[in-house]
Image: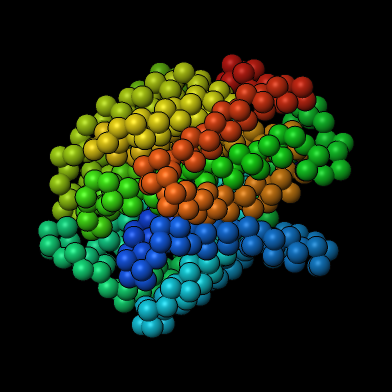
Amino acid sequence: MSTQNLKTNWAQFIPLVTVFFFWGFVAASNDILIPVFKKAFDLTQGESQLVSVAFYVAYTVGSIIYMIISYLTKGDLINRIGYKNSLALGLVISALGTLLFYPAANTGSFPLMLSGLFIVALGFSLQQTVANPLAIALGPITTGSQRLTMAGGINNLGTTIGPLIVSFAIFGSATSGNTEMSIESVKTPYLVLGAAFLLVAVLLKFSSLPDKPAAVVEVEGEADNTRSSALKYPQLILGMIAIFVYVGVEVSTASNLPEYMEKNLGFITKDIAPYISLYWASLMIGRWTGAIEAFTDNMNTQKILRFIAPYLAFGVFLFVNAIAKHDLTPFYVYALIILVLIVADMVSKGNPARMLLIFSILGMVALLVGMTTDGMVSVYAFTSVGLFCSTLWPCIFTLAISGLGKHTSQGSSFLIMMIMGGGIVAWLQGEIAGILGIHSSYIVGVFCFAYLAFYAWKVSGILKSQGIDFDKKVSGGH
């Protein structure tokens, strides 16, 4: 950046994160659609995970289409049409996808449902390509990752609310006693969502967001920028795999949870929504905790906020579930598990590699506890995976593009392409569930976290060899 902003531009940042909310709302709602579609269309667990496959593979397809268009037109598409226009275009594409839910619900067509989700996510792919670097650009570079974490917290407000609203649309209130599901009832929330996409597209078009924000560049002398392509940097190559398995374990843990709770614990589908909401709220809890440095440089204030932010986010979860008339009694004990997150966040000291290592190990422990126990202990263990996934996206993203210099935007597009891991890993776990059983299938997530721990260890050495040391950056303050 030729001139770096001295503080976050909140007037531009706040309307931007609306799209982050949409991504979370739809992604988490898929976890309610999976068991509904499984029963309505008589699918196997592996086939039901095609919901995740259609949604997350669309990110990769969207990135490839974007790269092909940019290549054929001999210029970057987003730079040509502008950031605001690109966001608006992405929202319009997603709105077109929601329209397919109307004929899909009326005809009871599973392929048409998948097509609708695919097109919605296709629009999200373009939005992600624009919004992630834009969130970083709306303020000082030093707090860019915290703004991305904060945007992720807004994303998870959507993931907390989404399953509850979609479940209400299908089954009614928690006290209604209705356990019958209707595919036709799915169309209403998605048509409303499509209208919201179009409304926000218009509002963003006339907002003060910059059409072409200043590019984020590396500090001079920080890294070697003589390489010909982003793919020449090992931190990016390994980081692409890390994004793939991270999104994979995050999505597969939640999307297979309804099957586990129904088959092994005897839950009925309508009663699972608050637990899916808790899983995604756990990501919000962690991200609100990890974003506090974007608000203040005062260390004493940060220490206080580290305890206030997670429980404030937990309070949001309790509030929305109280409105939905769910029994809150089973969730109060979760306040103790949140303490583990707070301690881990303090120990990481803002170093993304250290945080990635610590949280990946805790994620493995949570899955292993869930696999070796049963009853509500296992449910809390599986939902706590959300806590330990919470800050991994900004950690991996920051580590993977560090030192890329002029190749940063190219590297970012490669990372977004790997979001397809959410669909593929979820499908893989669904298939393994058919062989080993749903409880044992969570071993897939253990291997995902194991790779993330390896990446955290490996990338530290790679970056230090290029002259990038996050310990020095952290000790120097933000």
In the picture, residue 182 is in which quadrant? Answer: bottom left
Relative to 451, residue 184 above or below: below
Screen quadrant of the C terminus: top right
In the figure, is residue 69 to the left or right of 319?
Answer: right
Relative to 266, residue 97 above or below: below
- Residue 296 shows in this picture: no
Task: Report the front residue among 383 and 469.
Answer: 383
In the figure, is residue 35 to the left or right of 143?
Answer: left
Image position, residue 468 (x, y; %): 71, 24
The single residue placed furthest to the front in the displayed view is 435
In the picture, residue 90 is in which quadrant? Answer: bottom right
Task: Report the front residue among 9 and 192.
Answer: 192
Image position, residue 394 (x, y; %): 55, 38
Q: Residue at x 71, y 39 (%)?
A: 236
Give the colouring mode of the picture. Answer: rainbow
Relative to 58, residue 313 above or below: above
Relative to 239, residue 178 above or below: below
Image position, residue 331 (x, y; %): 22, 38
Q: Residue at x 36, y 35 (%)?
A: 371
Q: Residue at x 62, y 18 (%)?
A: 471
Q: Residue at x 15, y 39 (%)?
A: 329
